[in-house]
Image: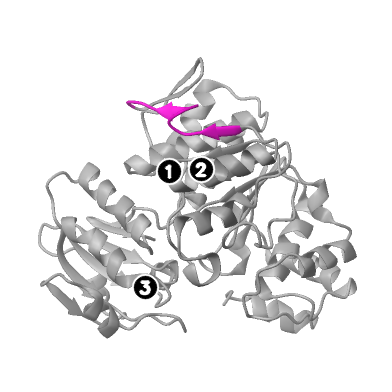
Amino acid sequence: MIPKFDEYKERFSVKSDDEIKPGLESIRRALQKVGNPEKDLRVIHVAGTNGKGSTIAFMESILQEHGFSTGVFSSPALVDVHDQIRMNSMPISPIEMDKTFVEMKEAGLSGMLTDFELLTVAAFLTFKRLAPDYVLLECGMGGKLDSTNVVEPLVSIITSIALDHVGFLGGTIEEIAMHKAGIIKEGKPVVVGSLPNEAMQVIRTKAITSNSKFVMYGEDFSVIQDEFIGGSIKIQLTKRRLKGPHQAINAAVAIEALRQAGVSMKSERITKGVATASLPYRFQEIAEGVFIDGAHNPAAAKMLTETIKSEFPGEKVDFVIGMLKTKDLKKTIDELIPVANSFTFITFPHPQAASAEVLMGSCQYNRKRMTKLGDDTIILRKGNDRKRIVAGSLYLLSSLLN
């Protein structure tokens, strides 16, 4: 479900399938029909269970601080399809999307692709036309069979690996790591964040067989007391809008990836880029004491808990939770219990949304309740002196704010 995408498909009579069909044959045929626009782009390719969006936000901010133009392709949509394809941090205009659909219609792409494959082609065509200096490309799911995996990147990034999308990617860390490692290309460096040992071994092996330089957080570069250290390079990272210990790692991965991509940078501009980088729905304060965060799986929930401990030492918070039923509900909620005062569960309008009743049944904490999505006085206002955190699906968070 990509908001407003169907409007373009109907207007230009371009059909696509709303199912998920992993594989690259169809998109490769389609890209040939439109002249392989992806081959003209300077791409940094990003995969990972969590941290993709934040790492891209740091790279985007650092690049723009140095005067480079940026294109970003990401998912899911926060408001509608336009914000999935961004130029210099701004969603592309309907006029630009019209131009792209004209190209796809004239090339005869109707009926060839899934929705996400068609949108990926749209992103490549748009970026070829607008010609950003760098394209920051986020995998939709996995890596090896994701429709974005048709590029020859300057550098590949794997931010993190945890259990998610197990129906498509496999039920073990090693299986998921194999999918993520699929974005590593022959002779191109790969930069990895903090990964479980079993995932690290899979990624390292793939890098060796691909003759790819393997650059690992904690071994080749790191952040120690708000300072990036990579070889002889030291850069101060004293301020960040994106909060939490995990965001320091994401910032370090972003810096190292840009270095490996050969981007010429200055330390003071890197510091400013990291300080000013922002991303909607990542521990974002939307009212006094009210925060929203897109923690939608156990790994992300664990990071949110660590952020709360770091930002509000010793405090308990009131959670409002809405999630997709395809996620590991119980383990995600369990990760939040150490910093929870209470849980409020809601159902939100999405075909895959878990009901509040199911969420309640997945919660092992005594102080819990259900409420209706439209009751903003409960959801978007803190109770007493406690902070309130609205967390879970990005679809939920976008429905609250738009």
Front residue of 234/147: it is 147
Is 191 part of what is drawn in magenta? no
Asked if 37 appears above or below 6 in the picture, the reply is above
Q: Residue at x 56, y 37 (%)?
A: 191
Kindly state the secondary structure of the residue where label 1 is placed. Answer: helix
Kindly state the secondary structure of the residue where label 2 is placed. Answer: helix
Residue interval drawn in magenta:
214-225
The residue that disc 2 covers is 201
Is residue 252 shown left or right of residue 303? Answer: right
Asked if 105 appears above or below 40 in the picture, the reply is below
At which x and y percent is residue 65? 57, 33
Residue type at numbered disc 3: Met
Residue type at numbered disc 2: Gln
Is residue 127 shown left or right of residue 363? Answer: right
Circles 2 and 1: CB atoms closer than 8 Å: yes
> Does label 2 or label 3 sit earlier along the sequence?
2
Q: Which mark is residue 323?
A: 3
The residue that disc 1 covers is 197
Kindly state the secondary structure of the residue where label 3 is placed. Answer: loop
Inter-mark Cα distance, 1 to 3: 29 Å
Q: How is the image coloured?
A: one colour
Front residue of 381/53: it is 53
